[in-house]
Amino acid sequence: MRVVYDLDVLKPHEPGNDLIARSLKAIPGVKYVAIKIDEIDNVTTSVFITIQGTGDLELENIKEKLEELNCALHSLDKVYIYDDDWLCETETK
């Protein structure tokens, strides 16, 4: 089974996106992390994070890691869950 989460996250300017991506990648079951900046103000940055992983991946572990990094999960915008032998068409677009 494969799992994909699209998250809307508010973070301070530090830590940087690279450290956040590497920290999320270290969570058991995570195979891919992408971060895209949405908006920057004087103190915070809004980012969209896509995390792909195996069926072992749990949203609670992602939330805990984000909190450790002083980030706030605003919303879980999309969730894809599919079998390993089936490619979700929306992932290829």
Image (cartoon, rainbow, N blue to C red):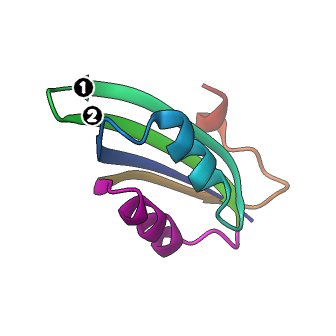
Q: Position of residue 80 (x, y in %)?
A: 56, 54
Q: Quadrant of the N terminus?
A: bottom right
Nearer the observer, 33 or 66: 66
Residue at figure coordinates x 62%, y 46% from the top left = 22
Q: Amino acid at mark 2?
A: Thr
Q: Quadrant of residue 92?
A: top right
Residue at figure coordinates x 70%, y 68% from the top left = 28
Q: Amino acid at mark 1?
A: Glu
Q: CA distance from mark 1 to mark 2?
A: 6 Å
Q: Is residue 24 above or below residue 16?
A: below
Range covered by the magenta-colored residues: 55-73
Outermost residue, right side = 85
Question: Answer yes or no: do the residues labelled 1 and 2 have beta carbons within 8 Å?
Answer: yes
Outermost residue, front side = 14
The residue wearing badge 2 is 45
The residue wearing badge 1 is 39
Q: Position of residue 82 (x, y in %)?
A: 68, 59
Q: Who comes first in sequence, dot 1 or dot 2?
A: 1
Crowd class of label 2 (few under 14; some 14 to 19; many from 20; radius 10 Å) = some
Q: Is residue 48 above or below residue 76?
A: above
Q: Which numbered disc, 1 or 2, marks the residue closer to the eye?
A: 2
Q: Quadrant of residue 84?
A: bottom right
Q: Position of residue 5 (x, y in %)?
A: 51, 53
Task: Reply yes or no: does residue 53 show up in magenta.
Answer: no
Left or right relative to 50: residue 37: left
Residue at figure coordinates x 41%, y 56% from the top left = 69
Left or right relative to 44: residue 77: right
Q: Is residue 47 above or below residue 23?
A: above
